[in-house]
Structure formats: structure tokens, C-alpha cells
Amino acid sequence: DEERVRMVRHPLEVPELTLRRGFFPLGFPVELRTNRVEVMRVAEEAWGVFEERFDTEAIAVDVHVTESETKECPPGPTYSIVQPLVVSFADAQNYCIADLSRGRTQMVVSEAALRHELYFRYFFLESAAASHIATSFTTPVHGACVALNGRGVLLCGESGAGKSTLAYACARAGWQYVTDDASLVLHDTPTLTAIGNCHQVRLRPSAAEIFPEIQGIEMTPRAAGKPSIELPTAGRAGFVQAESAEVRALVFLNRKDEGEPRLVRYPKDHAWRYLRGTLFGPPEAVAVQSRTIDRLLSVDVLEMRYTELDWAMERLGTLLEEGQ
């Protein structure tokens, strides 16, 4: 009788998870379970380039794939935080719940979502691990990170400020490239250390006017309403990948000022509000992140007003090499 009960599944139950494998996105252990080999293949493309760097408890990610008749890409998800849960909902067949207190994410996605791999990877798979990494082990900063001779700078600013563009330009010129616009500052380290995904860069389609080599590359669909071009950095001419860098300065980018290009002091209270705006998670996690922000504000906090990339790169180089 018990065996018969176990064999009867409710029609609303999602498929059982029959596949399991470990990955290390950004160096943190993740145990992925799913019912489809396609999910494992996408995970290998996204996370297979990373090796284990941190001895933390494994994040659990469960991906249930359901059948779907439509082939249309699902809409971009909306997000809600109901502590300690982060809920993302695209539609009735594509949704995700991350329990930040337990280090576990459970999601249901349709075959339609899986057919659109960039969509599935960006909105569901990668974010499933990122939400835990960005609350339990690091402080997220909406900023790019590049380094010169190991000295790192966080390039900050609102959407469209040119963070990824300047980071990519620096990387093409031989700087160490850490990440485009999603930096993570490690907790409990002697120095302020930023990490990120040095294996890819995302640029707006308009960047093709500056960097002709990215023309014709497929765009990520529905990426927060702003389509982006994603490209790997491995083997790219001039690129030096760096898994981390010691943060020596925060530079807020301002390309709207048409006056003489210059690097000036930036109000730390403004910087604090900007950095604080990316924090989320349980109160105890946010308290740790707030202390990390205080540490970040101990380095030089500056505003770069510029229009020319070459001038910006040269000025950043002087800042990192000479400290001024």
C-alpha cells in the first residue's frame, strides 16, 4: 500500500529530479539537480569555467523543467522579497523561489524557456546562485572592476553611465579584467577584494559603434528591458582575466558633463546611498554588507567627468599607479 501511494503523483506536482552535479560559480560550491540534461549543458557553459576557490556550504539549486507547447520566449520576470525569500515570477510556468536562510533555490521553468538559452541562463540559472553568493558571502556593488598591476578600481554609476564600455576598453588595452557591472566584495578579508565573472562581458548593442568586433553577436533577450551583447573573454586579444583584485578606488562615471575632463572628489554620502541601494537579504546579512560598504568608503571615492575613452583610461592609470 505504501508503495502504491508513493507511485501516485498529483497532476500539479513538478517532475522529479533525476540528475545531480556540482559546479563552482565564481568559486563557490553549488549542487545542481534537475530532470533535463539540457539544464546541465547550459550550467556547464555558464559555470564550467570556474574552479573551487571558497570552502563554503554548497548552495542547492533545483531546476524542474515542465513540458510546454509554445516556443515563444517567456516574459522577463518580476521580483519580490518576502524575507527570507526572493521570489521571481515570469508567468505560471516560469518562476523561482530562493530561500536565503537555507541557501536553497527551487525553480520551475518550461521547455519554452529552456529553448531560449540566454534567457534561461540570465534570468534563472545564474541568478539562482548569485542571490545566495551576493547575500551570504559578499557585498554586491553595481559597478565594473578592472585592475592595473593588481590595483583595482570599481567603476560605478547609474545604468548607461558607461561602466561596461570603459571596463571593456581597459581590458582591450591589457588591463586585468575582473567583471563588467556586477562586482562582489568578499567579506572578512584583510584587504578589500572584489571578485566577478572575468569570463564574460555584457555590452549594450550601441557599443558596436565603438568596438566593431562585437557587431553581429546575438543579443540576450529581455535583459531587464535592455538587450545586451554577451561575449566570452577567453582568447580575446589583449584580455587578461583576473578572478579578483584589491580595491584601491571607487570612481563614479559622468559622461554627461561637457566641460573639461577631470577627476574630482565625490561626496561619500552620495556614494553610500548608491552602494546601499544594491543590498538585499535578511537583516543580519545586510548588517555585514553595510560594514563592508563602510570599508569601501575608506578608499579614494572620485567622480570622473569625461567624454573620451582614451583620456579616461590614461587618467585611471595615473590614479592607480601614482595614487592621484
Image: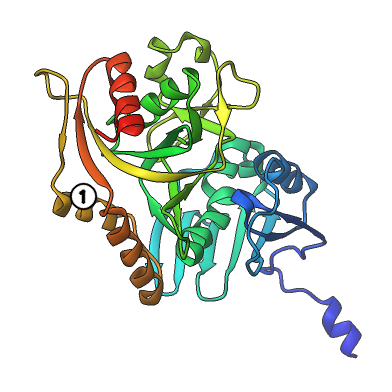
Q: Is residue 71 visible?
A: no
Task: Tell me the quadrant of the picture where the C terminus can be found.
Answer: top left
Residue 311 vertical placement versus 274 (above, below): above
Element type at mark 1 = helix
Nearer-the-camera pick, 104 or 283: 283
Q: Is residue 324 visible?
A: yes
Residue 101 placed where, x, y %?
Answer: 51, 75
Residue 258 placed where, x, y %?
Answer: 11, 18
Horizontal side of residue 308 vs 269, given as left or right:
right
Horizontal side of residue 318 vs 207, given as left or right:
left
Residue 243 placed where, x, y %?
Answer: 57, 42
Residue position for label 1: 271
Count of marks overlaid on the render: 1
Which residue is the extreme one toward the left?
259
Residue 294 vertical placement versus 301 (above, below): below
Q: Residue at x 31, y 42 (%)?
A: 249
Horizontal side of residue 71 vs 138, given as left or right:
right
Nearer-the-camera pick, 51 or 181: 51
Nearer-the-camera pick, 71 or 107: 107
Q: Amino acid at mark 1?
A: Ala
Residue 78 placed where, x, y %?
Answer: 40, 53
